[in-house]
Each structure stands twice: as C-alpha cells, then as structure tokens.
Image: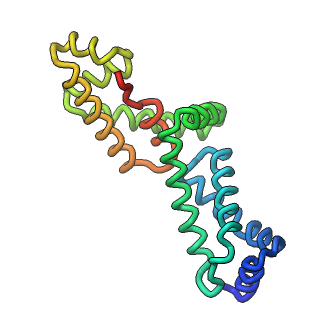
Amino acid sequence: MGNEEAVLLQRLQQGDTEAYIALYNQYYPSLYTYILHFINIPELAEDALQEVFIKIWEIRERINPELSFSGYLYRITRNHVFKRLKKISADTALRLQAMQELQHQTEDADTQLLWKQYESLLRQAIAQLPPQRQKVFRLCREESKSYEEVAVELGISRNTVKEHMVLAMKSIKFFFYTNTDGILPLLLVSGLLVTPSR
C-alpha cells in the first residue's frame, strides 16, 4: 500500500469526505468488476457496490491505515455479496426483480449465449438424476403438477414425491455450484426451480 493511500485512510478515519471520494474513485472499477463475477446483473452489482462503500464510511474509524486496505475492502465486499445473494434467493420480490432485470438483458447476444449455456447445464443436471427422481422432477416442474397428482400418476406417496423433489433440488444445486459462478445459477435454482410447498 502506497504512502498516499495511507494518508487517505487517515483522513477517512477523521471523516474527510474528499478522501472517501478519492478511495471510492480509486477502487470503483476493480470492485465493480469483482462483484460482477458473482452478480452479473449491472443494476444489482451497482447497488451492492454502493452498500459496501456506505459500510466503509460507517466503520471508517475502525480501519487500520497500516494494514492492506485493498484486502480488507475485498473481504468486506465478498461477505456482503454472499449475504446479498442469500437474501435474493430467500426474498421472492428481490428474486423477481432480478429475473426481470435479467430478462431485459437477454436482447444482448452475449447474455443470450450465457443463458443458453445455463439452460444446457440445467438439462445436464436433470439428466444426472436417478430415473424415478428425474420423472418426478419433470412432472412437478415442467408439467406443473402437484405432489398429489404426481403421487397418483406414479403410484407412490406424496411424501415420497416431496422427498424426490428435495433431493433433486440438492443435486441440481450442487451441479450448478460446481460448474458455474454468479447469480444466474442461483436464480435458476432458487427462483425458477424453487420447490413449491404443496
């Protein structure tokens, strides 16, 4: 860390807004790119970045100018992004917002290609399920049948259908998390594929 940055951090600790803005401008490009690796929707990545810097301002007095500010900043950013991803996966409204923003991007050729790659991965993930589990999953997700309807059709109990769906979701999530990064698989798995409680 350069001496100039250490001075900026000391000024930041004292509540100097010009030092704060200077640090923001210095780290904005690289941090934004870093966040996009996890949340590849620009609007949400921008929001996350703003929240990180608000946090930096709030805890400015605890920042040690003698330690690596870059490492500290990236650690805070990573933790914040992971919390935000969890919140998106758990919050229906946020998930829908993310999906809508994602759909606006699908006119872009690169995004369309990425989306097709994820759809292909999803098909691969489903294909790896045991035959009966795959059948249950397709009936519930692709044909939108209730657990009761699938239970009657396959001659198994409703609880067995539910168990198949829970295990299928775990397998698909594992497949996605080991083959991809970013928010798209999270939305696909936690949003489009969320197991209905029925």
Query: Based on the displayed image, in which of its 4 quarters is residue 148 positioned?
Result: top left
Q: Quadrant of the N terminus?
A: bottom right
Question: What x and y, as percent, mark residue 60?
Answer: 68, 73
Instruction: Identify the residue shown where x is 32% and y is 35%.
Output: 169
Q: Is 194 situated left or right of 184 in this image?
A: left
Position in image of residue 102 (x %, y %): 60, 36
Image coords of residue 175 (percent x, y): 33, 44
Pick the residue in front: 14 or 108.
14
Residue 26 occupies quadrant: bottom right
Q: Residue at x 77, y 71 (%)?
A: 20
Q: Is residue 151 above or below residue 115?
A: above
Question: 160 above or below 30?
Answer: above
Which residue is situated farthest in the left direction here? 155
| Residue depicted at 49% across the width and 38% down the height | 187
Residue 181 place in picture, x, y as percent: 46, 50
Vertical position of residue 122 compared to residue 49: above or below: above
